[in-house]
Amino acid sequence: QVQLVESGGGLVQAGGSLRLSCAASGLTFSRYAMAWFRQAPGKEREFVAAINQRGGSTDYADSVKGRFTISRDNAKNTMYLQMNSLKPEDTAVYYCAGKFYSASGYLIHILRDVKYDYWGQGTQVTVSS
């Protein structure tokens, strides 16, 4: 049974930092491109960041570029999202997602729009002003 479990969310003041984790089990993690999405109340889910299977290529939404860093540790089957300089508009439920790829020859930007194979249950991030 495949599971993606997010953790690390919470309440933080504007300007603060949080690190989210996404622990994967039941799959060959190193064969999956991974991404973070978020959904704020009353809004559609939006892309935040993505990383390829080996972690050598990343992509970010313009709204988080320069503040967030996505990374992964394939030995630990875990993906991370380091979030710095948080803003109230970052408040949302953050979800991790995984997409199987048999090869790595794809443009990283396609991870913004592909249909993901697996999703986590989400973790709440609240940024107070």
Image (spheres, rainbow, N blue to C red):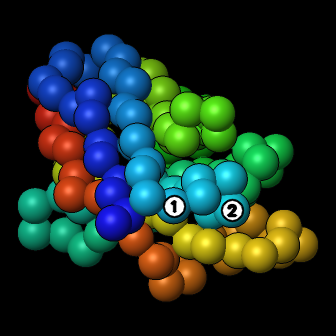
Q: Position of residue 80 (x, y in %)?
A: 49, 35
Q: Position of residue 22 (x, y in %)?
A: 40, 42
Q: At 44% from the left edge and 22% from the top edge, which residue is drawn? A: 84
Q: Position of residue 29 (x, y in %)?
A: 59, 54
Residue at numbered disc 2: 31
Residue 72 in sight here: yes
Q: At 68% from the left edge and 53% from the top edge, which residue is drawn? A: 30
Image quadrant assignment for residue 99: bottom right
Front-most of 3 and 117?
A: 3
Q: Position of residue 41 (x, y in %)?
A: 10, 61
- The Cα–Cα distance between marks 2 and 1, rounded to whole angstroms, is 8 Å
Residue 87 horizontal side relative to residue 125, left or right: right
Q: At 46% from the left edge and 77% from the top edge, which residue is drawn? A: 117
Q: Amino acid at mark 2?
A: Arg
- Marker disc for residue 105: none
- Closer mark to the observer between disc 2 and disc 1: 1
Residue 89 in sight here: no
Image quadrant assignment for residue 47: bottom left
Query: In the orientation shown, which residue stands out farthest toward the right?
Result: 105
Give the vertical position of 75 relative to 47 (above or below): above
Give the vertical position of 31 relative to 80 (above or below): below
Do the CB atoms of the residues marked 2 and 1 lie less than 8 Å apart? yes
Element type at mark 1: loop
Q: Amino acid at mark 1?
A: Leu
Residue at numbered disc 1: 27
Residue 22 horizontal side relative to residue 59, left or right: left
Give the vertical position of 116 relative to 122 (above or below): below
Q: At 60% from the left edge and 58% from the top edge, which residue is drawn? A: 28
Looking at the figure, which quarter contains the N terminus?
A: bottom left
Residue 125 horizontal side relative to residue 104, left or right: left
